[in-house]
Image: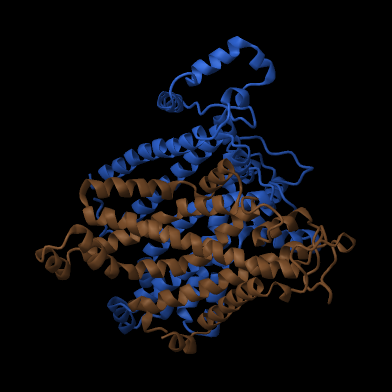
Amino acid sequence: MGLLKYTARRLVFLAFLVIGVSLVVFVISHSVPSDPVLANLSQRNIDNQEMVDSFKAKWGLDKPMYTQYFIYVGNLVKGDMGTSIRTQRPVMDDLKKYFPATIELAIFSIIIAVFFGMLFGIISAIKRNSAIDQIIRGISVVGVSVPSFWLGLMFLLLFYVNLGIAPGPGRISPYLAPPAAVTNLYVIDALLAGDWSLAVDALQHLLLPGLVLGSFTMGLITRTTRSSLLEVMSLDFIRTARAKGLTEKMIIMRHALGNALIPVVTVIGIGFGNLLGGMVLVETIFAWPGIGQYAYKAAGNLDFPAIIGVSILISINYVVINLIVDLLYGILDPRVRYN
Amino acid sequence: MLLRIMKNNLLFSIGIIVCALWILIAIVTVLVPSITPYSYLAQDLANRFQAPSSAHWFGTDSIGRDVFSRALVGSRISLIAGLITIALASLMGMIYGGIAGYIGGLTDEIMMRVSEMVMAFPGIILAMTIAAALGPSLHNTLLAMVIIWWPNYARVMRSMVIANKENEYVEAAKSLGASHFRIFFNEIMPNSLGPVLVLATLDFGNAILLFSGLSFLGLGSPPPTPEWGAMVADGVLNFNYWWIGTFPGLAILTMSVGTNFIGDSLRDFLDPRLRKEI
């Protein structure tokens, strides 16, 4: 019961969050002088008084701001986020179009980050204070310190321009057609269509941006795995395991790692949240047609319907990921009680 | 304490040296502008896109400005941006979190939900929106950064205040008839500052990184101010001339690696469970 109630409470917060986030952008958008009618309708429609009136009626533009906001939320509940000023398409359609690219990249880089981060962290903890430990600690600090947009530029210059071993920007090579849309995750769609070469091409395109995007999270995970593992290794039950005569490998894999994972899971959650934010810079460098670039262009054009849409989408993700992390605690550590 | 940590920790020593060097460069280039080989604004159209050479160590950019001189001068803006953001955000967070923790109850609940909302908000998008709405300038970018940065400090401060307000010395001050204001500022605040200051040190590198990211997106000072992020963006536009973007990026990297080496070691040192390792 505790778990269900806890989840329900968190989901209620989610609803408040959506309202809060949209309200913030809504207030900003209304403190900037701009005419939404001019911005939203094409010239032909502006000449058409009927169109202008119906547009105004739909969004309540002749009513006070708080009424407009209620109308916005009403439309939002129905899944209508308005029309993007820049693309002239419904924001919901735009999000559906660009979000899968972002998700694909995010998942790929979180896999890289978790794999290498935990591997480095474990090695570093086992070989504590050795040269390899110092090197890994150095790498992890560089990972969290390196500006992603610069690392992206360096990777492209080195691997694409000079060495020619990595593909250029974009999701697939320009001469290929995207796979038939099922999930809109190109690698999976290509596999579903049985097109191996296309899947490989899409994977290759994921590699550089995935590494760049994952570097921060990888550094974070390395650091946390190391310190958490070291802490656990100093506990009594590890001494008991040693006294039993278990090998060091057994002790780490069976006894220490599971207990050391809890802080690591927290960091993975934080890292995933960061990833979605860091998207803006990485997608810009790699011409990745995702939500980050969409948000960047929207902000530059003061395209408020789009900005609200992206903000709501990313905050929902953030909260859901945090919820999943909190629920994972209960699985990893049966002592955790939700209240 | 500083020397004792430095003696046993290579990474910490590197961090201190690198940061001291950048601070020195920032101060010297302000006091003695002529120390850079060229003026950071001087254009030389005849010598644009020059590769690194003995005349131009880091080459020249698209309008013939010396990248080395601009990279040196860029340090002051990054340092100031990091400093102002962290100072204002921690001050705001301390007051906000302190009040929430001290009053407690429903006020606390509501105040913390609001701060969580700001945290859930995609920071860089909020910053972009604010900066775009107000117009790109250094001032507005810093404002945007402070707005997205303070909740971290509010959370830490709140938990410290909640832990400290049950202490006996607070009880003593209360029984002596001290006002809430006095208890808050004279008793609780000074005893809760430590962790906030540690967080501020750890955060400095992150603030510089975010600032350079926003500046890369064109949301910093308008040109020709030499901002590292904007200079990397220039390098992206002039993709065929690798030096334009590479060196300013290395400047950002060294500064943020330096602060992170310091912060990392400091955290290990201050965390009693890990202290025995150092």
- The one nearer the camera, B20 or A264, is B20
Q: Measured from the top left, where is residue B25 in percent x and y?
A: 63, 75
Q: Is residue A119 left or right of residue B109?
A: right
Q: Let me know if residue B74 appears in the view.
A: yes
The picture quadrant where one finds residue A53 is top right
Q: Where, quadrant-wise, is the N terminus of chain B in this rendering?
A: bottom left
Kindly identify the residue that appears in the image at 34 percent across and 82 percent down.
A242
Residue at the image position 46 percent from the left and 82 percent from the top: A128
Q: Residue furthest right?
A: B46
The colour scheme is: by chain
Image coordinates for residue A332, horizontal then vertical, percent? 34, 59
Left or right position of B185 against A311:
left
Chain A as rendered: colour? blue
In this rendered view, identify the residue nearer to me: B145 or A33.
A33
Look at the picture and state if A4 lies above or below B164: above
- The picture quadrant where one finds residue A337 is bottom left
Residue A252, horizontal then vertical, whole percent: 41, 74
Looking at this rendering, what residue extends furthest in the top direction?
A50
Which chain is represented by brown in the image? B
Which of A222 and A51 lies nearest the eye of the viewer?
Answer: A51
Pinpoint residue A122: horizontal percent, then vertical percent: 47, 73
- Taking the view exactly as shown, the residue that stands out farthest to the left is B175
Is B17 placed left or right of A69 in the picture?
right
Q: Is residue A19 above or below residue A102?
A: above
Q: How many marks?
A: 0
Which is more toward the observer, B225 or A296? B225
Residue at figure coordinates x 35%, y 57% from the top left: B154
- Which quadrant of the rendered structure holds the C terminus of chain B? bottom left
Q: Residue A292, located in which quarter of the rendered image?
A: top right
Q: Is residue A115 visible?
A: no
Q: Is residue B76 above or below residue B18?
A: above
